[in-house]
Image (spheres, rainbow, N blue to C red):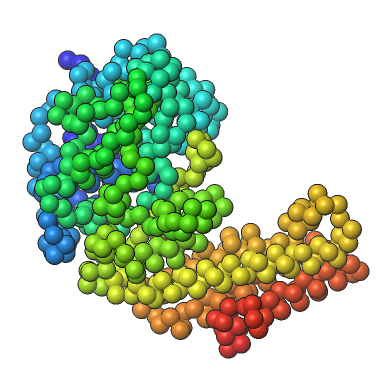
Amino acid sequence: MGARYDPRAEACLTALTTGPRPHTAGIGLVAALEDAERFSGLVCSTPGETVAVIEYLLALIYASRHVPRTTQQWRTWVDDPDGLKKAAQWLRERPDDEWNLFDPKQPLGQNRALAEFIDTEGVGPAQLAIEQAGDYNQFFDHRHLHATEPMPAGQAFRALLTQMAYGLGGNAKIKPGLLGRGMFSQSVARLGGRVRVVALGRTLGHTLRLNTAPATSRLLGTFNRSWTDERGPERRSFHGAKVDREPDGLADVHSFLCRSVFLRPVRLADGSFAVDRVLVGSGELLPPSLNSQFAQDAVMVDDKDRRTLTPLKASPDRALWREAHALYAAVAERQQGEDLYGRLAGLPEQHINLWAVGLVARQSSPTAWVADEFPYVSGREQEFRTAAKTASEICEYLAVALRDAADTASAVVYPNPKPADKATHRARFNGAPQMWAGAGDHFHMLLDAIAEKVPLHETLPVFVRSLAALAGEALDARLRSLPDRGAGMRARLEARHRLRTALNHKKKAPDFLKEALRDA
């Protein structure tokens, strides 16, 4: 018998149990659906991997066709602890040969056409993990591309799902001639270029039901089980021009094969299977812009360059909490109709968290996963939006004030600087980075207070005064190295005076900032 790994039954996932003594348990895909109320959530190695697994479970739910058809039905179904049992039963009853990660004809999630090249062209399995592979040539931990330590099958399966969801553009570590030159140039996967927002419920089951959109049979679509599945859609060719494919439904888009991947199995000493060689190349191409029904969580923000709305992206320079006002605006405005936020707003005062996850990348090289949680209670959309927007504006204003104070100190200490040194001198005294680093905790305390129904007029002044104090501390920390005499003392006094002036400026300072400090 050949290599076999069936993620439906194998412990390919780790979940945290509920109850007074929670512990982790290894589970398969069937158990993740059937026993979803036993688990508070998934435990994965990265936020992106967690999202990728949730995406796959959602695809299975849609593929089972056991989902509510209308929003009204969804509101009842979302709190039904048995709501996923039929989907689990459907998955359990699928033919076994359709669910083997190493099937010789239709390997799960893979492109069998690469098999003939795996022995000669394959590389080490760590290339499969986005956060390890870097630019697919040198790993972050300095292991060489061809490091051959086998990757357990369950880990390889999760990494495969993450590649399909978050794979970045650029050239693959694969010969351009394999299956055609189109195999060489990779496209950005569906979530590789934007922030994914997941509504987190009380249990894993609640989370999955919250994020499952109601759909008629026409919108459910086809599940992508394997590149060589004859019952699936016609796949692209790599010999001619790039051709994208419009997903035919929700199951299709959540299981889209954005990479051509092949995994070579090896049996370990304990009898289990692992992966020792992989090939990763270009996969299916999504249309430039997806129908909004296939991106129901997307947070749209202004693209100042293109003067249009684009999905929120992860940034190396801005923490996700600094964009929370855009998330709460999506919840409050609900311009896309019955999207995720529209459905959540229709639930009776449920307290959930909106979990935002993105991949920060430098061109085709991933840098870091970023993730943050934001509380939400239906019926309090406007309070959250106002709090987030006001807090963001105040933080931005304080950052500018700290930069100006730094300029004042720099002008005193370095009266005749070289033009090339001005930025360095400002950076020495600029407390804005320190202020930003500490502001996130205060921002989340503000949102938590809103979630606990503390009136906005009580919570915002507390936040404002805390941030003003934080700005003063950040400036003092930057000025501490100056001597207590001469130019050092003058720079300290003038910089502090400029910051105080900015905090109370009649025209420039935000009204809420002036009012909060005046009433302190």
Residue furthest out toward the right: 486
Residue at (63, 70) in percent of width and height: 398
Q: In the image, is residue 192 above or below residue 203?
A: above
Q: Which image quarter holds the N terminus?
A: top left
For the question of whether residue 446 can be seen, the reply is no
Q: Position of residue 47 (x, y in %)?
A: 39, 47
The outermost residue toward the bottom is 519
Q: Position of residue 50 (x, y in %)?
A: 34, 45
Q: Is residue 138 above or below residue 448?
A: above
Splitting the image into 4 quarters, where does residue 78 fall? bottom left
Q: Nearer the viewer, residue 31 or 139?
A: 139
Is 58 placed above or below 448 here?
A: above
Q: Is residue 358 visible?
A: yes
Front residue (pair 414, 275) = 414
Instruction: Report the front residue among 288 and 185.
Output: 288
Q: Is 360 placed left or right of 231 in the picture?
A: right
Side (left or right) of 34 relative to 280: left
447 displayed left or right of 376: right
Number of residue marks = 0
In this rendering, would 333 be left or right of 218? right
Q: Residue at x 80, y 73 (%)?
A: 494
Question: Which quadrant is home to the C terminus?
Answer: bottom right
Please provide percent x and percent y for residue 184: 42, 23
Q: Quadrant of residue 488?
A: bottom right
Residue 24 horizontal/vertical position (percent) = 30, 46
Residue at left offset 76%, top offset 52%: 424
Q: Indicate the quadrant where residue 240 lies.
A: top left
Residue depicted at 31% across the width and 12% down the height:
116
